[in-house]
Image (cartoon, helix red, strand yellow):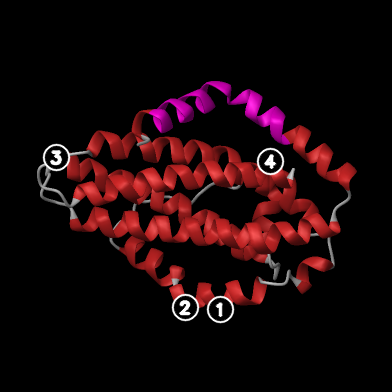
């Protein structure tokens, strides 16, 4: 299961690299790439929100929340917490949402997700970051539409895109080096294997969407 999630992280990172390239092109007045941005953000939502975060929140996190090892964290968890405070993701997304008050809150995949938000669980940190990613996808979608109508309206879009990429790359690295290490240490191979089966079942239910992810990646890869 953990290796499956890490492999998804690599694929999400590849999409983020493509998104960064398109973000730099927004600054070029001779290029108008609203369609490219729309397509890339759509497949990032499919892979990150609809699949990857779904697997974590509905399959992995409920089991991790029961582990006493979770409160101790991994060897790099304290370091990442300090970096998170320095980057101040909370303030950035709150500021962006003040300018777009009609963006709705993300739905929880299962009831336990709501309870993890409410109680003092270490998993509230990655769950908050999942929510921030959801908000950014919606905020960026609105700004891409405005950019499509007015190619000179670039600054708000670039700011949101760069903040989103920064959040996602930090989140990926933190999970790979901290949260997933706790899971590998604390969960048995049998449990991990069972969870991987559940994850693959979810993939099978989203086969067409995953095909679209691969098509868009191929279309915009250098």
Q: Quadrant of the N terminus?
A: top right
Q: Distance of mark 2 from mark 3, alpha carbons?
A: 36 Å
Circle 3 residue: 149
Question: Can you give x and y, in whole percent of width and height, for residue 38 in the image?
Answer: 31, 37
Q: Are marks 1 and 2 in contact (CB under 8 Å)?
A: yes
Question: Is residue 202 part of the magenta span, yes or no?
Answer: yes
Q: Are marks 1 and 4 in contact (CB under 8 Å)?
A: no
Residue at image location 65% in from the left, 55% down from the top: 114
Point out the residue furthest to the top here: 208
Question: Can you give x and y, in whole percent of width and height, for residue 80 in the image?
Answer: 59, 72
Residue at image location 53% in from the left, 21% down from the top: 208
Splitting the image into 4 quarters, where does residue 97 fall? bottom left
The answer to whether residue 109 is seen in the rendering is no
Circle 1 residue: 82
Instruction: Tell me the mark number nearer the camera, choosing from 4 and 3.
Output: 4
Camera-side residue: 197 or 107? Answer: 197
Q: Distance of mark 3 from mark 1, alpha carbons?
A: 40 Å
In this rendering, the answer to whether 147 lies above or below 69 is above
Boundaries of the magenta span: 199-218
Circle 2 residue: 86
Circle 4 residue: 4
Instruction: Tell me the mark number nearer the camera, choosing from 2 and 4.
Output: 4
């Amino acid at each position: 299961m953990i290796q499956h999630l890490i492999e998804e992280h690599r694929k999400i990172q590849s999409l983020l690299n493509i998104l960064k390239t398109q973000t730099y092109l927004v600054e070029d007045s001779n290029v108008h790439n609203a369609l490219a941005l729309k397509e890339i953000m759509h497949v990032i939502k499919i892979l990150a929100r609809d699949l990857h975060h779904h697997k974590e929140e509905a399959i992995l996190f409920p089991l991790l929340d029961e582990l006493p090892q979770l409160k101790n964290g991994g060897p790099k968890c304290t370091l990442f917490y300090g970096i998170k405070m320095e980057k101040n993701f909370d303030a950035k997304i709150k500021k962006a949402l003040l300018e777009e008050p009609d963006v709705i809150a993300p739905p929880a995949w299962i009831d336990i997700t709501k309870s993890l938000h409410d109680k003092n669980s270490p998993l509230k940190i990655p769950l908050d970051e999942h929510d921030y990613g959801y908000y950014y996808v919606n905020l960026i979608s609105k700004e891409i539409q405005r950019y499509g109508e007015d190619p000179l309206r670039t600054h708000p879009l670039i700011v949101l895109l760069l903040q989103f990429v920064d959040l996602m790359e930090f989140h990926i690295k933190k999970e790979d080096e901290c949260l997933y290490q706790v899971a590998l240490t604390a969960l048995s191979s049998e449990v991990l294997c069972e969870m991987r089966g559940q994850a693959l079942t979810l993939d099978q239910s989203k086969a067409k969407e995953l095909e679209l992810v691969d098509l868009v990646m191929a279309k915009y890869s250098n």
